[in-house]
Image (spheres, rainbow, N blue to C red):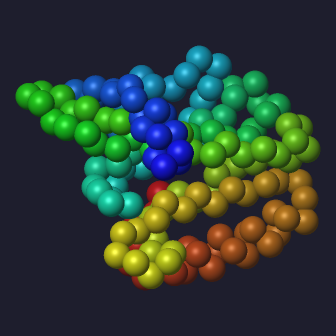
Amino acid sequence: MKLTTFLLFLAAAAIERPAGESPAVFAKRLTPANRELAHVPLEGAFGPGAGNVVLLWRKADAVDTNYTGEVLVPAASAGSSRSYLRYSLPPMQEIPGHFEIDVAAVFYANADRDAPLELIVLPQPQGSAIHLSLMALTKAVSRIVSQGLSVS
């Protein structure tokens, strides 16, 4: 019950998207001050619905490369625009300056064998032994994705 209330609170403000506005333009318009996109915006079907937009940002200072993000879920369409509800993704909490973190891949996959696809974000820290193991994981996921899942 508390989680549902919390999610509803996070999604209280609707965002309008004019018909025909590309995901890139939509993302640029919503990018907070002092932030830059950490990955190209991705639009697709995952979770219970379709047309969801995934936005990932990082601070533009190039020191703290931890990313934050949102999923925008279509709420309604009216005339020449579409309304979205915002849901915040949990932020990364690595120590700023210890790793340079890139987003290796963002895609949808069936991770738990139910009908809806799940959102998967693969981070790629640079400058550590973790980098090598994540490269191997990314290659393995890329092989799986090349067999029919969407990736960007």
Q: Which residue is drawn at 40% across and 78% down?
A: 114
Q: In this view, does 49 lie above or below 150?
A: above
Q: In which quarter of the image is residue 80?
A: top left
Q: In this view, does 25 lie above or below 74?
A: above
Residue 39 location, x and y as percent?
56, 45
Q: Residue at x 80, y 72 (%)?
A: 133
Q: Which residue is drawn at 41% across and 73% down?
A: 149
Q: Nearer the viewer, residue 130 or 112?
A: 112
Q: Which residue is drawn at 28% across and 55% down?
A: 50
Q: Quadrant of residue 78?
A: top left
Residue 62 location, x and y as percent?
77, 31
> Most extreme residue toward the top, as rendered?
33
Total numbered labels placed on residues in the image: 0
In the figure, is residue 31 to the left or right of 94? left
Q: In which quarter of the image is residue 63?
A: top right
Q: Which of 100 and 81 is in front in this view?
A: 81
**Is residue 93 visible to the viewer in this orientation of the structure?**
yes
In the figure, is residue 21 to the left or right of 122? left
**Is residue 56 visible to the viewer in this orientation of the structure?**
no
> Most extreme residue toward the left, as rendered?
79
In the figure, is residue 74 to the left or right of 6? left
Residue 138 location, x and y as percent?
65, 70
